[in-house]
Image (tube, grey):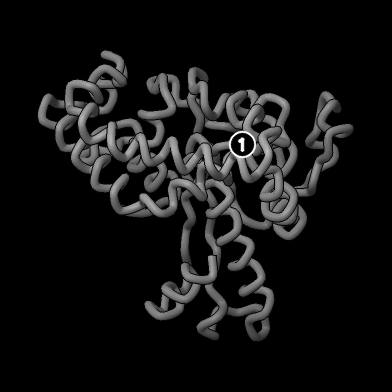
Amino acid sequence: AQDVLEVLNAERVKSVYIVGVCIGHPYAVQVCRQLLISEEMSPSNTNTDSSGIQLCGLTLVAPFISTVCPCSWRVARLGAFVPSAVLYASTEAMLSLASFLVPRVVSGNTLKKLVSPEEAEYGGWMEEDYEDACQILLQCMEASQNARGVEARLGVSKIWQTHVCDKFAVESRCGLVLQEALKDENPKNVVSEPSIPIRIHASSQDKLASLSSIEWIAKRCYGNVSIQVEEEIHSHEVMTFFGGPPCNPVLLHKIVQKWGLGQ
């Protein structure tokens, strides 16, 4: 988060919208926390100082939910019970194997099987798009090789729920709603209006970031904001591609338009 702030300050950015996708969820929220602190510390709460960057909004797309949630991804919840040394060794071994196998197995045709006909029509996928997306995926995997082990272990950790998301709920005035209050049929009675606009996009058929887990985090930490369910998208993979091929990320276009940008 601090690295992001340093880049924004170096570029003299005065206002910003944050988007978090999948496991980028806690990273995005931590950046928002830093920006909120930065705003509070700026002189007279104005943005005349380089440290006072205005946070205009937060968008989460298929956010991965921590293992504190009882309906988060089952594999991650099982991993949370594995001793840390065993978890470290197993994730490193699996990622090394994936680094060897994926470039030899994944192709445009493989990726095409992950995209349903309805998703292909919605995103305007063409035959050449699958090969382009495959090449980008492989390049990203190579560039992020050192980080993937950390992110795999982050996925099973409960720490970022309490140290990042829960703290953001308090600092953004969303109101932190713990397990007892979540049973309330009308949780809006125990939360307040967030100090920044928050939008969440999800797929009802996403198995990794299930709609029920996203509803849980929305009630607990994000002011019970309404969740935009993308009915045209049927999988987590296509959600993380913003609903379309790299040349036409239709969901990202929708997000930008909703914020009134790119006019």
Query: Where does residue 27 sit, x and y in percent of width and height?
Result: 54, 54
Classify residue 141 by image quadrant.
top left
| Vertical placement of residue 32 versus 53, above or below | above
Query: Where does residue 16 sit, x and y in percent of width and height?
Result: 47, 63
Name the residue: 28% across, 32% down. 101
Q: Considering depth in this image, is 24 or 176 the residue closer to the camera? A: 24
Q: Considering depth in this image, is 138 or 197 the residue closer to the camera? A: 138
Count of numbered circles in the view: 1
Q: Residue furthest top?
A: 117
Name the residue: 47% across, 50% down. 19
Q: Residue furthest left?
A: 128
Classify residue 14 as left or right of residue 153.
left
Q: Where, quadrant-wise, is the N terminus in this rendering?
A: bottom right
Label 1 Cα crowd, 10 Å radius (few <14 / some 14-19 / many 20+): many
| Vertical placement of residue 56 versus 110, above or below | below
Q: Considering depth in this image, is 11 or 86 the residue closer to the camera? A: 86
Name the residue: 74% across, 55% down. 167
Classify residue 76 as left or right of residue 81.
left
Query: Where does residue 223 sit, x and y in percent of width and height?
Result: 71, 43
Q: Secondary structure at mark 1?
A: loop
Query: Where does residue 260 sit, x and y in percent of width and height?
Result: 41, 51
| Vertical placement of residue 4 versus 199, above or below | below
Name the residue: 28% across, 37% down. 100
Q: What kind of residue is marked 1?
A: Ile
Q: Residue furthest right?
A: 180
Q: Which residue is mark 1?
A: 65
